[in-house]
Image: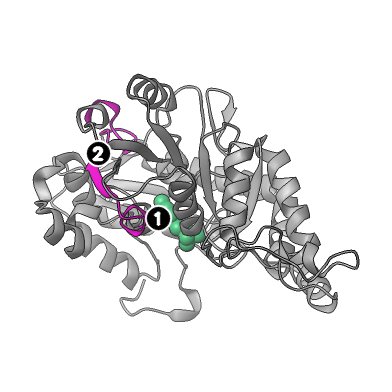
Amino acid sequence: MSDSVNTDDFILFSPPTIGAKELHGVEEALLSAWITTGPKTAQFERQFQQLVGAPAALALNSCTSGLHLALRVLDVGPGDEVVTTTLTFASTVNVIEHVGARPVLVDVEPDTLNIDPRALEQAITGKTKAIIVVHYAGHPADLDAVSAIAERHHLHVVEDAAHALPAAFHGRPIGSSTNLTAFSFYATKNLTTGEGGMLTGDPELVDRARTLSLHGMSRNAWKRYEAEGSWRYDIVAPGFKCNMTDIQAALGLAQLDRLQQMQQRRKEIVASYHRAFAGIAALEVLPCRPGIDHAWHLYVIRLNRKATPMDRNRFIELLRQQGIGTSVHFTPMHMHSYYRNKYGYRPNDFPVAYCNFQRMLSLPLSPAITDPQVDRVIAAVLKIVAPPGRQVA
Ligand SMILES: *Cc1c(COP(=O)(O)O)cnc(C)c1O
């Protein structure tokens, strides 16, 4: 294999799966009289609600908006603290700042890299109002432990389910509880609308979020412009603008139709990776605990420092040279300059997240990745960390 990058052959980290159904759906939406929030968005909400067994569902322009609205409708604001994991994407923590509350970051469990329930409980103070859990990589966080803590301390639980469609914790689908739960349909996620999100949970809270998602209008624009609609509306709160469009919903409906098939393909790729890396001392894969239905959004591997001197950044560069795109999920939030400077965090404040961050990377995983591509990824990884005859346990 040559050392220069052949861009034709480059295996993207997470290419989307867009086909004729999506193209047809979007065309239909564009040629209909309704292109913003309308009948297709309503249908997407209904079908998504059915799929995960949600008490209610609200389609939005992003998961970030869903998390923001969740904190708003729970009246989280100045003076309040919200406890969450440091090993997450920026928006989980940014939204806490947006509502004027204080984010309190905690460390993760060494096996799943999900929020550590013991660290979570220790971080609770008299000011704590809510907990945001993140179902990291698609493996649900320990919802039994988190719910027990939330009940003991009378706290709200918000779920960042950006990675967790479809996933279940001991038979309960993520999104089926009354917790406000935010899904992402960003370009790289398991189901995509380009940009988009869905908020599920308690019907009354989701209803308040619906009003806030469209300027705080007492009734939505679709109803307002229907034949029987009227020009009258009332602003009941200074709301936001984060509704989903029917163009996005058309994409979402087409993707919902083949979600099962896409998940099947994800599982096949994961099985191939698992088989190939099982006996390799230099690599640690993330476990799936009993009772978990994993969404397999990410395939994270970690370098085992005891078995290889290979540096993570060098590993990523060597893979790139062999035409393989990877990513890192995530730089822990306490290491980003805004949070580091504002709250005085040091890298080792959360040693599990910090150590894992330094030795982790995410391999290409998407239903659009072919078997020959999977074989190429595996061969490239093994060539770097386990040259023939060496380091195979
Ligand atoms: C992608 C992601 C988000 C944000 O999703 P958007 O739809 O882009 O707003 C939030 N949390 C996590 C953990 C994510 O991976």
Q: Which residue is mark 1?
A: 363
Query: Based on the displayed image, in which of its 4 quarters is residue 142 positioned?
Result: top left
- The image's mark for residue 248 is none
First in sequence: mark 2 or mark 1?
Answer: 2
Counting from the top left corner in percent of width and height, residue 293 is at: 54, 32
Query: Based on the displayed image, in which of its 4 quarters is residue 356 positioned?
Result: top left
Find the magenta span and give its range: 95-119
Q: Residue furthest right?
A: 227
Quadrant of picture, ligand 1? bottom left
- The image's mark for residue 281 is 2
Q: Is mark 1 within 8 Å of ligand 1?
A: no
Counting from the top left corner in percent of width and height, residue 33 is at: 85, 76
Magenta span has 98? yes
* Quadrant in which the C terminus appears: top left
Residue 275, visible in the rendered structure: no
**Quick check: marks 2 and 1 in contact, CB under 8 Å?**
no
In this view, the residue in front, 365 or 337, is: 337
Compared with 216, 303 (above or below) is above
Residue type at mark 2 is Ala
Element type at mark 2? loop
Magenta span has 199? no
In this view, the residue in front, 284 or 171, is: 171
Q: Which mark is nearer the camera, 2 or 1?
A: 1
Counting from the top left corner in percent of width and height, residue 96 is at: 34, 52
- Whether residue 55 sits left or right of residue 288 in the image: it is right
Element type at mark 1? strand
Residue type at mark 1 is Leu
* Quadrant in which the N terminus appears: bottom left
